[in-house]
Amino acid sequence: MTPHTPQVVFITGASGGFGTAIAHRFAALGCRLVLAGRNGDRLHALAAALAPALTHSVVFDIRDTAAITQAFATLPADFADLEVLVNNAGLALGAGPAQQASLTDWDQMIDTNIRGLIAATRLALPGMIARGQGHIINIGSTAGSYPYPGGHVYCASKAFVKHFSLALRADLLGTAVRVTNIEPGMVGGTGFSTVRYKGDQTKAAQVYADTTPLTPEDVAESVLWCATLPRHVNINRIEMMPVTQATGPLAIHRQPSTPSSAQ
């Protein structure tokens, strides 16, 4: 099979974690990159590190639909013909049970993991369809398939991403636009758990204690593989975990029986 090299790649959440690793892999291929994120200083530093790759940075919060729309509408000519959109921006907040969770945290996860992702996708699709090529790559999670205690809205948001990706494939049948959902399990080397635990480094470190988790570069490699396959090949889903992780049995709560009173 002859590999395909995309020309223009748009990456949300590019200023750290998966996004930065993904940017480096595409830059090494000579792709032109649109780097999107909230932290302008980090985006500027990333663009400098990627030189001589051609980059265009856009600073916005993925929850701001108006800002996303403006960013897509004002792409320079050299970056306007998007071939790959990597919907990477996302987060988890809190790990306690649902009945103790913050509604503000829930709103932020929904706005980031769902609303931002679908807005970027909707803005990218018409051009991809018109040009007869394109690829939506969503960064989901194994949490979308295997819910866990304290996951509540985060798990639900990633389940949405999984089914949204599959529904897109159904809608796009007959076009040349591809859709892939990448579903990593435990990944270290990012700020994911630090954000989830609101900056508590001790709790964040405990998540990865005595394990060898996936790295952002592992995830970036899977994204690159999907994007560089021949255009007639669509990878629907990639579920990936480190060997130190696996699915487990369903939880069962056992209520101790009450001893019968003496006769």
Image (cartoon, grey):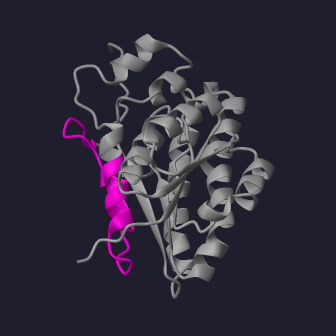
Using the image as rendered, state which of residue 24 and residue 186 is in the foreground.
24
Viewport quadrant of the C terminus: top left
Magenta span has 227? yes
The segment highlighted magenta reads: 220-248
The picture places residue 146, in percent across and down from the top left corner, at 39, 47
Relative to 215, is 224 above or below?
below
Image location (x, y in percent) of residue 57: 62, 45
Q: Quadrant of residue 3?
A: bottom left
Residue appearing at x 71%, y 44% in the figure: 63
Is residue 55 one of those drawn in magenta? no
Q: Residue 210, image x and y in percent?
A: 22, 21
Is the residue 147 above or below the residue 134 in the image? above
Q: Residue 73 placed where, x, y %?
A: 75, 61
Q: Residue at x 50, y 36 (%)?
A: 48
Q: Quadrant of the N terminus?
A: bottom left
**Front one among 251 and 16:** 16
